[in-house]
Image (spheres, rainbow, N blue to C red):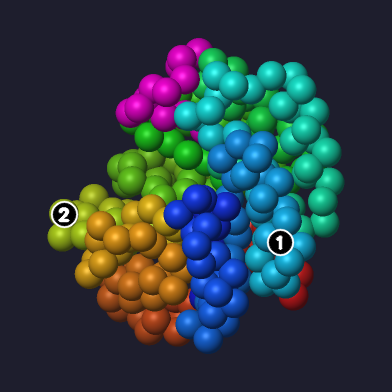
Amino acid sequence: MFFDSHAHYDDKRFDTDREALLESMQQKKVSYILNAASNTDSSLQGINLAKEYDFVYASVGVHPHDAAEITEETMQVLEEYIKQPKVVAVGEIGLDYYYDYSPRDVQQYWFRRQIQLARDVKKPIIIHMRDATQDTMNIVMEEKAFEVGGVFHCYSGSLEIAKQILQMGMYISIAGPITFKNATKAVEVVKAVPMDRLLIETDAPYLTPAPYRGKRNDSSFIHYTAQKVADIKGISIEEVAKQTMQNTFSLFGIKR
């Protein structure tokens, strides 16, 4: 049984079959799902999904793509949302210089503010980092995000940076791209990262693993990622499932 540590079931691509899909997850060996937020609307939708489904948890936060839309009122809304009983993290937050949908200085400012919120409420963070490695790492260090812990989701960085993340006591999450033929750098990272610091995720509906690349992703495909991790580590998929679930419980303070 798997814990999909990062998915987006508030996404419009699930509007036609969200309920049926979520209700089928237990049969598909997915025990738990964390619905990661991208803005205040999706934060609220994630909270509502967590209320409806016992196996769903939620994070609240604003993705760097939407950083230009954040105001002080937004932060007040997040402060209220994070009080909900099944909200276990602040995220996904971070920096994205690949698309640059929001100005970089604005992304940096609100990344810092959301880390500060996480520290205030003693919740871990879920970090989005794309083409912004050094600035992300600097902000994480300067804001002492490691004091509350967190995960670099869908990690695609170097082994060198992965080692720095581990030194901070934070986690690295692996998603569908590990199954792609060109995933040499990711394979190197998985080989080196201890099993007690790895999470697995789908990032559904994005990043569908091979052999379904290009189609809508959902949590039932997480076993492809788990199997690839097992192959790289030379262990069973059952060991991957058990350890990554334990890691996800530990990071997010979930007691079952």
* Residue found 78% across the figure and 44% down from its top: 82
Instruction: Identify residue for label 2.
Output: 182
**Nearest to N terminus: mark 1 or mark 2:** 1
Instruction: Answer whether residue 226 is visible to the viewer in this image.
Output: no
Residue 7 image position (x, y, % from top left)? 51, 57
- Say what amino acid the circle numbered 1 marks: Ala
Instruction: Identify residue for label 1.
Output: 50
Extent of the magenta region: 94-105
Query: Does 101 appear in magenta?
Result: yes
Residue 156 is left or right of residue 38, and the answer is left
- Say what amino acid the circle numbered 2 marks: Asn
Alpha-carbon neighbours of circle 2 within 10 Å: few (<14), some, or many (≥20)?
few
For label 1, the SS is helix
Q: In this view, does 154 lie above or below 77?
A: below
For label 2, the SS is loop
Q: For the residues labelled 1 and 2, say whether their Cβ atoms are less than 8 Å apart.
A: no
